[in-house]
Amino acid sequence: MVDDDFTTLAAATADSDPLRGLQAMAEMRAEIERLEAVLVRRARNDGVSWARIAAVLGVSKQAVHKKHGGKGLLGGRA
């Protein structure tokens, strides 16, 4: 997603129609989730521990591992 697209979505959350605002919020959430997965994968491929990733995200090691530790991330090792 291009920065301008995300900015447009953010602005749309202030739409007078709450359903349009909610739709924009849902699209932003999906993009944030996608980007988080990409960055976690990159961090793991660079050898960053689950504990360090969890600390940066402000969640437990178990939570981040459960969410992103599936197959394909260096075997999902802890």
Image (cartoon, rainbow, N blue to C red):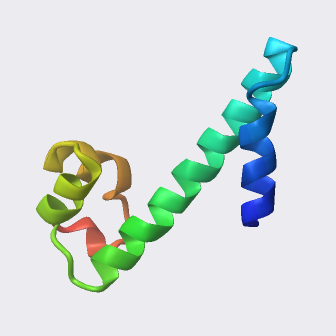
Task: Identify the residue at horizontal 27%, vertical 66% (top origin).
Answer: 76
The residue lying toward the viewer, choosing from 19 and 49, is 19
Q: Of 10 and 1, which appears nearest the observer?
A: 10
70 relative to 51 in the view: left or right = right
Q: Position of residue 77 (x, y in %)?
A: 19, 68
Vertical placement of 4 versus 64: above or below?
Answer: below
Q: Quadrant of the C terminus?
A: bottom left
Q: Is residue 72 visible?
A: no
- What residue appears at the point 80 percent right and 56 percent down from the top-left corner? 5
Residue 74 vertical placement versus 3 (above, below): below
Looking at the rendering, in which quadrant would you find the N terminus? bottom right
**Residue 22 visible in rendering:** yes
Outermost bottom residue: 46
> In the rendered image of this protein, does residue 9 appear above or below residue 16?
below
Residue 43 falls in which quadrant of the image? bottom left
Quadrant of the rendered image containing residue 59: top left
Q: Position of residue 35 (x, y in %)?
A: 54, 61
**Residue 51 spot, x, y in % from top left:** 12, 60
Would residue 61 be found to the left or right of residue 31 on screen?
A: left
Q: Nearer the viewer, residue 14 or 34?
A: 14
Residue that appears at 35% across and 72% down: 73
* Left or right of 22 in this view: 74: left
Give the quarter of the image for residue 56. bottom left
